[in-house]
Image (spheres, helix red, strand yellow):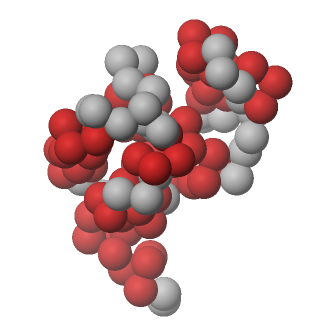
Amino acid sequence: MSKIIKYNEFINNDSLINDMCIEVENKCGHMSDLDRVATHPIYKEIIKIGKPAIPILLQRMRSSVYWFNALRSITNENIDQENRGYIDLMREDWLKWAKDNTA
């Protein structure tokens, strides 16, 4: 079993993931460059968590623009490419993706 899988089993805690997201949003709130936000160490840790973080990221995405890169990284999907730059449409793309990809 890989270290990441073991880490994911340990960290599969929605409250902790949400707290990590809030910390990124608070520390990066002044940044307009989303690629720069994606270099924040806690942001990278959220991506390492992987699929367990997706529901939290989708929820946080409703009020924050920071999570599109993380969703792309975790899902290996680029579903918002056509609407890049149009935040409301990008959110709609991801919410549709979530609806289509949940059991």
Q: Name which residue lies at 28% across and 41% down.
A: 28
Tell me where residue 44 appears, x and y as whole percent.
41, 62
In the image: residue 60, left or right of residue 2: left
Instruction: Please provide percent x and percent y for residue 34.
Output: 49, 40
Residue in the picture at 32% in, 64% down: 41
Tell me where residue 9 sits by quadrant: bottom left
Q: Nearer the viewer, residue 76 or 34?
A: 34
Residue 45, percent from left and from top: 36, 64
| Vertical position of residue 2 compared to residue 94: above or below | below
- Decide if residue 73 is on the left or right side of residue 63: right
Residue at the spot 36% in from the left edge and 18% down from the top edge = 63
What is the quadrant of the C terminus in the image? top right
Question: Taking the image as drawn, is residue 14 in sight?
Answer: no
Figure quadrant of residue 48: bottom left
| Above or below: residue 19 compared with residue 45 | above
Q: Please name the residue shown 74% across and 20% down the image.
A: 83
